[in-house]
Image (spheres, rainbow, N blue to C red):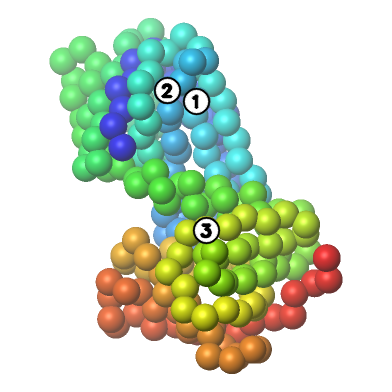
């Protein structure tokens, strides 16, 4: 993740406000990526994207100079930038460790989020219809990876798989367990059809949780 962004403070504050999605503190505490915003340069300028379980919002700043991409906490970036004059030029330079925000002689550092975390969250939201009543997602695994399905939509995630099988879960509960992990990977273990799904963290031997499956709805 490397990015360099230049724009006016007032324009960035307004765009961040448009992307702000209503979230509870408990949600962002368990799943930090829900509170993040992705800034990405493209041919149309700067795109600013935020994702929650209710959907994704993207806005653009066509006058911005942007190259690469960066993700950081939306609230923290907005709180910082709104203290600058609206016509002040803001520069954001980011790498995999931090983002440096400068304007004139002022210089601040903000933590960044792995872009992969936001993309994974967006893919979960895209597969699961936020308007459905039960928020059920089916999980099917085979040599091709981990297949997600809900309400006629489907996606496939790259994964190391042993054997083949299928189950279904409430997406919100699985997302909360995923957000509690300390590492970048998750291990799901299903002993038998209809059995409890064991969730562990390959990078934290002390993390252990279970989720009961549910019957997937007929497609």
Mark earlier in primary sequence (1, 3): 1
Quarter of the image for the C terminus: give it: bottom right
Mark earlier in primary sequence (2, 3): 2
Q: Which residue lies under the disc numbered 1? A: 47
Q: Position of residue 97 (x, y in %)?
A: 21, 42
Quarter of the image for the N terminus: give it: top left
Q: Which mark is residue 157?
A: 3
Which residue is depicted at the point 43% across and 28% down? 40
Q: Which residue lies under the disc numbered 2? A: 41
Asked whether 61 or 24 is in front, the reply is 61
- In the displayed structure, would residue 4 be above or below residue 199? above
Q: CA distance from mark 1 to mark 2?
A: 6 Å
Which residue is depicted at the point 75% across and 74% down? 216
Q: Residue furthest right?
A: 218
Q: Nearer the viewer, mark 2 or mark 3?
A: 3
Q: CA distance from mark 1 to mark 3?
A: 25 Å
Q: Tags 1 and 2 in contact by the CB under 8 Å rule?
A: yes
- In the displayed structure, would residue 182 be above or below residue 60? below
| Neighbours of disc 2 within 10 Å: few (<14), some (14-19), many (20+) | many
Q: Is residue 12 left or right of residue 106?
A: right
Q: Tags 2 and 3 in contact by the CB under 8 Å rule?
A: no
């Amino acid at each position: 993740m490397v990015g360099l962004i230049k724009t006016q403070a007032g324009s960035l504050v307004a765009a961040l406000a448009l992307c702000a999605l209503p979230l509870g503190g408990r949600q962002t505490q368990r799943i930090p990526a829900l509170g993040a915003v992705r800034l990405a340069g493209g041919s149309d300028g700067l795109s600013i994207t935020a994702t929650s379980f209710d959907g994704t919002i993207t806005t653009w700043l066509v006058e911005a100079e942007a190259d690469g991409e960066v993700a950081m906490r939306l609230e923290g970036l907005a709180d910082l930038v709104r203290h600058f004059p609206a016509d002040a030029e803001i520069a954001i330079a980011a790498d995999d460790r931090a983002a440096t925000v400068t304007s004139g002689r002022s210089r601040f550092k903000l933590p960044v989020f792995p872009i992969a975390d936001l993309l994974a969250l967006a893919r979960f939201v895209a597969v699961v219809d936020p308007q459905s009543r039960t928020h059920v997602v089916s999980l099917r695994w085979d040599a091709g990876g981990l297949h997600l399905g809900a309400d006629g939509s489907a996606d496939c995630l790259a994964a190391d798989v042993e054997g083949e099988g299928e189950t279904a879960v409430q997406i919100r509960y699985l997302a909360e367990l995923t957000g509690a992990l300390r590492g970048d990977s998750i291990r799901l273990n299903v002993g038998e059809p209809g059995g409890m799904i064991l969730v562990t963290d390959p990078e934290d031997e002390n993390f252990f949780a279970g989720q009961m499956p549910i019957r997937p709805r007929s497609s």
